[in-house]
Amino acid sequence: MGRVQSPSSIKLYKQCPRKYYYAYILKLPTADNVHTIRGRIAHEVLEDFFDWNPDQLTSMNAEVLAHARVQELLIAKWTAAHAEVRKVMPEKELEITMFEETLLMLLGWSRKFVSRMRATGAPLPDAFRQLTPERELELVDWDLRCKGVIDAVHHTQAGVDIIDYKTSESQDIQEHTLQLAIYALLYTLKHGRQPRRVGINFLKGDEAYLDVDERLLALARREIEDIHSKTASQDKKDYPRCVSRLCKWSSGQCDFYQVCRPDLGID
Ligand code: SF4
């Protein structure tokens, strides 16, 4: 059986086939950075937020309790990841800035969640249960040889909405079309029915959605088949370099820059 692809592996190939070769054929290690560590911690907070008994929630105290829960979880996750955090954020000022920024994002998210609970018109403990999504749902399709992990699946009266959380500055959903299309396809194949929408919750902004239709599902299928055909080889020469500003920038460089050395011009 060939390699099982994912939205990340396809994205990496599109960014630079040589980078894919180093990561998925040679399996060279990659390093975490400030954004991957912070993103992981934020995801963990949002996942665990719902493991909570909401019986004490009322319209009066919901916002305070939700904020306190987010804060408590963030401190716990940040502390647990202390070693990794210090590795990527050696300067205390940077760590404080990132912590505060993450807290603000998560508080913004919890404020909106409380509004959504209130908007249901149901008693808040019921609204909490009603709005609790399925979380970290791993979907694999062995025929397609593709997998993905969905952050949140919301079951609404209008249909199923799939959500991915992003902590990035950019809030352009089009940049994530392929990832969302793959989630929609994997969900459809597993459940035999299409989700209604797939979207991104930009934690620094709002939610944005794409409607799921045949065109979106066909895009996912096409791209998955395409990556399988392009990555059957084990030969480095079949994975050309794509030299760009993603090789080296002012504050960092590609994980494989030292093995690749695009600056030497020798392949
Ligand atoms: S250094 Fe540049 S060309 Fe080389 S693998 Fe990384 S992104 Fe690709």
Image: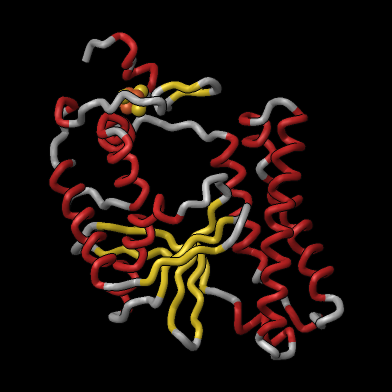
Q: Is residue 71 visible?
A: yes
Spot occupied by residue 58 in the image (x, y as percentages of width and height): 82, 83
Q: Is residue 232 left or right of residue 111?
A: left
Q: Quadrant of residue 45?
A: bottom right
Q: Is residue 3 left or right of residue 149?
A: left
Is 65 rendered above or below residue 107?
below
Q: Residue at x 76, y 50 (%)?
A: 75
Q: Residue at x 28, y 51 (%)?
A: 5
User: Is residue 212 or residue 66 the one in the foreground?
Assistant: 212
Q: Is residue 136 visible?
A: no
Spot occupied by residue 105 in the image (x, y as percentages of width and height): 68, 53
Q: Residue at x 52, y 35 (%)?
A: 32
Q: Quadrant of ligand 1?
A: top left
Q: Quadrant of the C terminus?
A: top left
User: Is residue 35 or residue 41 the one in the foreground?
Assistant: 35
Spot occupied by residue 233 in the image (x, y as percentages of width and height): 13, 37
Q: Residue at x 39, y 24 (%)?
A: 247
Spot occupied by residue 33 in the image (x, y as percentages of width and height): 55, 34
